[in-house]
Image: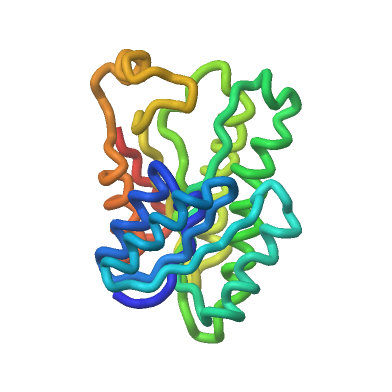
Amino acid sequence: MTGWILITGAAKRIGRAIALDLAAQGWNIIVHYHHSAAEAQEVAEEIRKLGREACLAEIDLANPKLAEKLIPSLAEELGMIDALVNNAALFERDADDPDGSRHWAVNADAPRLLSKAFRAHLPPREKGVIVNLLDATPPPHFAAYTRSKQFLAEMTLNMAKSFAPRVRVNGVAPAFVLPGPRQSEEAFRKMAGGKIVTPQQVAEAVRRLIETPTLTGEIATLV
């Protein structure tokens, strides 16, 4: 494969696995990040070692003006972007975001704005694909996070209908993948009950949805 794929939150964790997996299959990758500049640069270097091109894109997705301008500015520099993977997410306890506005901005509104801009930037008669990262097992005490991901799941199915036939829209909803930022490995494994999905398995599911031209409106649940 050739062409560009924008992956939000591609510097670390699941986003990094998705970026490297797609690069290994011949895609050029736009590595979006916010605070993780060093990690993003490392991912870009790994992509180039695989013989593909990499572009770094640093913005705060919580800022809607920046989110809606990202794809037009990238397209002006790189040309058409073939796929968008909305992977970046905020995952904080409700006490740290009492009104849920930060979670909504990053997890729900940014994917909506990016997806709208992605569809608008496509040249006539060209097609594209969007994959949204969802959550099969939202934890308790994270109501703001859960609401935002539930909205994104609903939006995935709605966009699959409204964006067809030019843009396919799918989702990947993994269960337990990696410990949270303040969670020990032991606590994570106890919560997961031994049913852990690897970042590579998530990456492979994303790739299948991107590269299968007949799939839209699908949510792949990984448990």
Residue in the picture at 35% in, 53% down: 18
Can I make out residue 188 in this image? yes
Task: From the viewer's perspective, tell me whether residue 153 is left or right of residue 147.
Answer: left
Residue in the picture at 42% in, 49% down: 15
Can I make out residue 214 in this image? no
The relative height of residue 113 versus residue 102 in the rendered view (above or below) is below
Residue in the picture at 52% in, 17% down: 140
> Percent position (x, y) of residue 165?
48, 71
Give the quarter of the image for residue 188.
Answer: top left
Residue in the picture at 48% in, 48% down: 87
> Percent position (x, y) of residue 143?
61, 23
> Percent position (x, y) of residue 152?
56, 44
> Percent position (x, y) of residue 177?
34, 33
Give the quarter of the image for residue 27.
Answer: bottom left
Give the quarter of the image for residue 44.
Answer: bottom left
- Where, quadrant-wise, is the N terminus in this rendering? bottom left
Viewer-closest of 217 and 96? 96
The relative height of residue 1 versus residue 152 in the rendered view (above or below) is below
Q: Residue furthest front?
A: 38
The relative height of residue 131 versus residue 135 in the rendered view (above or below) is below
